[in-house]
Image: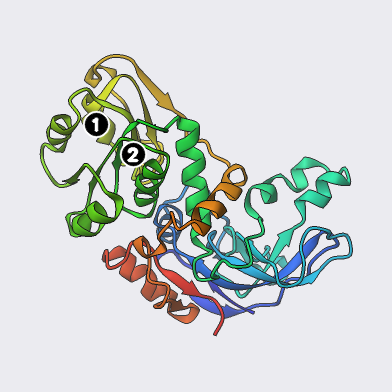
Amino acid sequence: MKAAVIKQFGSMVVMDLPDPEPSEYEALCELLYGATCTGTDSHILEGTFPWISPLPTIPGHESVGRVVKVGKKVRNYRIGDLVTRVGAPPLPNVGISVTWGGYAQMGIARDHWAMCADGLPESEWRGMWRFNQVLPASVDPRVAPMFTTWRETLSYITRMGVGQGSAVLVIGSGGNGIAYATHAGNLGARLVAMVGAERLRGKLVSKLKLASYVDHRSDDWAGQLRAVCPEGFDFIIDAVGKAGVADRALPCLRDGGRYGTYGLDDIGKITINPSKARGTVVIHPCTYDEAETHQRICEMYLHGKLDVSLWYDIDKPYPLESINDAFRDLRERRTVKALIRLRG
């Protein structure tokens, strides 16, 4: 198989590596497409992500695969199933680690349902329960990588409490920010506002029906937002995670509102000054579980409530051999996310 490998931070090289072999509880998958994640992949590539496996490593966690072979104890995957978040396993014989391993042509899905039923230790299958889920047969494989972002963000925002009649402020117009604004609308929020890049204003305001869209470069975006929602937002989600954003945003939160930092840009450096708030602030922890929202996301997608074109163009994927071009275009803000075609 071919896989994109980080040998040195800053770029990837596409290498020929051995195909993985599935164990008795595993399914071998041909990986078809993957999507970039600016919050993780870009930081991994830069060497600033806090959880990177030793180099050389295969990154990528939004890839999907088609089952081509199953182990003898697999009961919940069938040949031809489309499975989410499949990645190559570590390849110690050739000295390759994985940081999820999604940018490869072959990967492994673990039958966590069977492992649980057969009494195997939870430590052996718990992570796969979150990640490896079967998609409806009608899902376009080019759209399928988005299910990772959609599930994570829906889990986070519903745990936060967003629902019918909420006023929601999303800080960030990247892939996660767009997902949060989309989910807020689908959950019945009465008002959704966004702080984001000016170049995306026209597209996002119309498609997401935003009440307000403020340029993140504005010196007083908080003042503009207070005018839109004088009583204060019920929920504020920082989808970027920059130091200093919380103190700028807190005056926009109502007394007793919830504030959450989801982005990773300045992970470990975020501080909050309570004196900036109107009153009580509830800090929402960064917790989510993809599995708990998998079925709901499938239903939302099949009912036309999730528009993949807000994130990337399914007709213009980057071939695996051009993966560095995809990350260049991300850095230069030419695309929100990039779709990677993993096979020719």
Question: In percent of the image, x 50 and y 71: which residue is there?
Answer: 142
Is residue 12 something one can see in this rendering? no
> Which residue lies at the image location 44% right of the left edge and 58% below the top edge?
37
**Please, is residue 5 above or below residue 51 in the view?**
below
Amino acid type of the residue tagged 2 in the rendering:
Asp
Residue 253: where, in percent of width, then height? 27, 25
Q: Residue furthest bottom?
A: 344
Is the N terminus in the top left, top right, bottom left or bottom right quadrant?
bottom right
Mark 2 closeness class: few <14, some 14–19, many ≥20 residues within 10 Å: many
Where is residue 96 drawn, in percent x and y? Answer: 63, 67
Circle nearer the N terminus (1, 2): 2
Instruction: In the displayed orientation, state which residue is furthest to the front.
Output: 303
Quarter where residue 109 is shown: bottom right
Which of the 4 quarters of the picture holds residue 80?
Answer: bottom right
- The residue that disc 2 covers is 238
Residue at screen point 44% across, 70% down:
339
Decide: few, some or many residues near mark 1? Use Cα within 10 Å; few <14, some 14-19, many ≥20. many
Q: Quadrant of the C terminus?
A: bottom right
Secondary structure category for the residue under label 2? strand
Q: Is residue 76 visible?
A: yes
SS class, disc 1: helix
Which residue is identified by label 1? 249
Residue 165 lies, with reference to residue 2, above or below; the image says above
Between 327 and 311, the residue placed more toward the observer is 311
Q: Which residue type carries mark 1?
A: Ala
